[in-house]
């Protein structure tokens, strides 16, 4: 409206800029503007970035991390911090799935079996957290436990099953030109958003996350909520494990620790996905939509760096920088609000 | 707690155990683990094994100590493994050109400054350290990859690694003596200086501490600087001892260090625990690690046992907390009942009139 900030800019840009200046501190605005410039510059100069094919690649890369992130968002929204055992739950699930598949039980039975394992793993952690154990410690212990069990179960070897198998459609099939895993990501993202917004369970998640005392007073104990949300997170990581295993027709406990993306550690990447989009760690604020966008954001940055021809060092550096940057910006935006403490 | 004036040794012991249940449990666990391996493996209870345990203590002890301090302050530093890896990469890369002492100083200084910056941001932004350190974990990993040029860096001259593992006084080496010195210094700092007590204060009761005029920035920066310093020193010791460093290595330190800190009796709610606990916790983890190696356990199983150990400690802590809150609730209920009884006696209920 007024012309003080950027006189020669188009009207729409100027109002947006002014509105941001009104609401947030100049520091935040400068940071965000700087980021936007770098981002747009990177996008425009990267060869083949602005193509439909590349866009599909970005979403497909984001899918696996995104699904796990959506599961973890439930836990974070309900005020139970993180599960540091996402990667280990996935490792346990991938071994369970591959062993069931290699013994010839067929896709459906193997899927059910894996889900049972994941549900048990999630409920175990959820019960301990609900009883008052600290989520970080409980899941750190559970992580060691699951990883050990998975290694012992598979003798630390690669478990492979022969093609053709019943899971190929999930791993490498596609529908209407989109890979099935991308479709699964989109469906899960929409379902999770609807569940959180419009069902009583979803509202309870927000209630307990925002105000645990109020939740208890209205009869919603964290005990059952912790079990439910941890189970959701576990099931999501099991689904990712199954999809990944279906893609490569094999399984090893280290698939999620070393061969994944640029970071080399799935758990950290998933937590970063949840945090990068500005979900509040204290719970009660955020959404799974934010997480999905966070996954796409991280994958976009990575994709851009790949197209510019960078090695893994600068790529990890850039992704880490982006995560720290967005955490700082979100923290600055929310300074002093109740969401923070 | 100690109103009972028992004088004999058993009485005093009992009072101490009631006063410090977590530390007592830690000592019990350490003795159990050590005893198990000493009884089942006749190579375990020897001078050589004790030397090996102390060598492991040099690195893991530092990480356990750093995490203990962070958890006392009510925060956790997830980036400790990446920070240590960065220090290891730097020291190994620059030892050949600058000499080991200079390279080590540079690496430790960089790690400490990283810690300082993290602490400043945690206090300034008022965010949970776990959020920020998830980001810095990846960031530092990228920096380490960058510094190592995505290769495994190696020393060419092995006089320094030989010096670091020289055996001294039967059980020690220069590295472990240095680490013990750091432990003593930090124990004195935490217990007898104002800054140390501030760290306990912001962990145990942050709102009250801030209300009473403690500036959050100072203790937070001190804690994270110590954490970065310990990570850097640990990385330097690992890097110089083995002569190689990988940018993506050392991530196991976080799990092992956290297990050590929790066995040592810190409470995740902050404000509890101490340096002695950290030492005992680390020793327990080392007994387990070394014992498993002696019993020819595959390395991937070590994580399983670490997980089980941590679970046992959590069960104990959760159980004791649930027990305490039940006791308190019972106490309150019986208090209420007693008062109601006395009220009933004083002014008896009027006979209710049927409508």
Image (cartoon, helix red, strand yellow):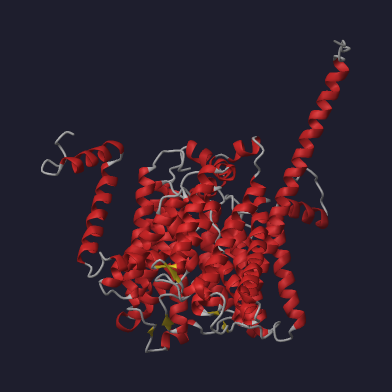
Q: Nearer the viewer, residue A147 or B312?
A: A147
Above or below A1: residue B96: below
| Residue positioned 53% across, 41% down in the render | A210
Q: Residue at x 47, y 75 (%)?
A: A258
Give residue B204's position: percent from left, percent from top: 57, 46
User: Quadrant where the C terminus of chain B lies?
Assistant: top right
Residue B126 spot, x, y in % from top left: 43, 46
Farthest residue toward the front?
A176
Residue A185 at x, y percent in the picture: 46, 61
Q: Nearer the viewer, residue B305 or B169?
A: B305
Q: Residue at x 55, y 55 (%)?
A: B71
Which corner quadrant of the image does residue A335 belong to?
Answer: top left
> Is any part of residue B168 visible from this angle?
yes
Which of the 4 image quarters holds residue B49?
A: bottom right
**Which residue sits furthest left?**
A8
- Pinpoint residue A77: horizontal percent, then vertical percent: 52, 48
**Which residue: 48% across, 39% down?**
B210
User: Quarter holding the N terminus of chain B?
Assistant: top right
Q: Is residue B230 visible?
A: no
Give whichever of B195, B97 is nearer the camera: B97
Q: Which residue occupies the foreground of this view, B180 or A321?
A: A321
Q: Is residue B80 left or right of residue A227?
A: left
Left or right: where does residue A211 sit relative to residue B90?
right
């Amino acid at each position: 409206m007024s012309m003080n900030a950027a006189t020669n800019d188009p009207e729409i840009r100027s109002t947006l800029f002014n509105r941001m200046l009104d609401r947030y501190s100049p520091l935040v605005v400068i940071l965000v503007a700087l980021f936007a410039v770098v981002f747009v510059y990177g996008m425009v100069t990267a060869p083949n970035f602005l193509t439909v094919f590349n866009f599909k690649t970005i979403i497909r890369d984001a899918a696996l991390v995104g699904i796990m992130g959506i599961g973890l968002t439930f836990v974070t929204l309900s005020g139970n911090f993180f599960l540091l055992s996402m990667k280990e739950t996935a490792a346990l699930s991938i071994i369970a799935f591959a062993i069931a598949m290699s013994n010839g039980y067929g896709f459906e039975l193997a899927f059910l079996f894996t889900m049972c394992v994941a549900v048990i793993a999630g409920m175990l952690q959820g019960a301990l957290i609900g009883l008052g154990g600290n989520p970080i410690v409980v899941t750190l212990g559970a992580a060691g436990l699951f990883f050990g069990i998975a290694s012992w179960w598979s003798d630390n070897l690669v478990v492979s099953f022969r093609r053709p198998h019943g899971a190929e459609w999930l791993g490498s099939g596609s529908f209407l030109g989109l890979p099935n895993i991308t479709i699964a990501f989109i469906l899960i993202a929409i379902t999770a958003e609807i569940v959180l917004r419009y069902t009583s369970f979803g509202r309870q998640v927000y209630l307990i996350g925002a105000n645990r005392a109020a939740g208890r007073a209205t009869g919603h104990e964290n005990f059952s909520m912790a079990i439910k949300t941890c189970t959701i997170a576990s099931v999501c990581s099991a689904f990712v494990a199954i999809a990944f295993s279906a893609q490569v027709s094999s399984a090893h406990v280290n698939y999620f620790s070393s061969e994944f993306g640029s970071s080399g550690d799935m758990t950290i990447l998933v937590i970063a996905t949840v945090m990068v989009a500005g979900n509040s760690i204290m719970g009660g604020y955020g959404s799974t939509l934010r997480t999905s966008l966070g996954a796409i954001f991280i994958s976009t940055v990575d994709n851009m760096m790949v197209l510019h021809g960078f090695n893994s060092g600068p790529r990890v550096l850039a992704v880490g920088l982006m995560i720290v940057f967005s955490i700082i910006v979100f923290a600055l935006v929310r300074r002093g609000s109740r969401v923070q403490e | 707690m100690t109103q009972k004036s028992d004088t004999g040794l058993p009485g005093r012991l009992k009072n101490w155990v009631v006063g410090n249940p977590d530390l007592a449990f830690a000592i019990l666990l350490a003795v159990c683990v050590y005893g198990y391996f000493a009884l089942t493996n006749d190579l375990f209870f020897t001078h050589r094994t004790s030397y090996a345990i102390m060598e492991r203590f040099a690195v893991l002890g530092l990480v356990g100590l750093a995490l203990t301090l962070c958890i006392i302050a009510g925060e956790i530093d997830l980036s400790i493994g990446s920070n240590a890896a960065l220090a290891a990469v730097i020291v190994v890369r620059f030892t050949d050109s600058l000499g080991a002492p200079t390279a080590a100083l540079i690496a430790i200084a960089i790690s400490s400054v990283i810690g300082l910056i993290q602490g400043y941001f945690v206090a300034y932004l008022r965010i949970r350290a776990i959020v920020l350190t998830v980001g810095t974990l990846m960031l530092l990993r990228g920096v380490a990859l960058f510094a190592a040029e995505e290769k495994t860096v190696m020393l060419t001259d092995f006089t320094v690694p030989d010096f670091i593992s020289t055996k001294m006084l039967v059980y020690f080496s220069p590295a472990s003596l240095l680490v013990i010195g750091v432990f003593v210094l930090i124990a004195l700092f935490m217990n007898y200086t104002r800054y140390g007590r501030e760290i306990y204060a912001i962990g145990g009761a942050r709102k009250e501490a801030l209300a009473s005029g403690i500036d959050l920035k100072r203790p937070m920066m001190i804690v994270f600087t110590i954490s970065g310093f310990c990570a850097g020193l640990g990385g330097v010791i690992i890097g110089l001892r083995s002569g190689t460093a990988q940018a993506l290595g050392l991530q196991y330190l976080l799990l092992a260090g956290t297990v050590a800190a929790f066995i040592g009796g810190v409470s995740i709610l902050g404000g509890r625990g101490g340096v002695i606990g950290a030492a005992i916790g680390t020793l327990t983890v080392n007994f387990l690690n070394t014992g498993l190696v002696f019993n020819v356990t595959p390395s991937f199983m070590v994580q399983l046992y670490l997980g089980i150990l941590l679970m046992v400690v959590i069960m104990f802590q959760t159980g004791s907390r649930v027990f305490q809150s039940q006791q308190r609730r019972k106490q309150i209920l019986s208090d209420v009942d007693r008062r109601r009884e006395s009220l009933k006696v004083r002014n008896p209920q009027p006979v209710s009139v049927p409508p």
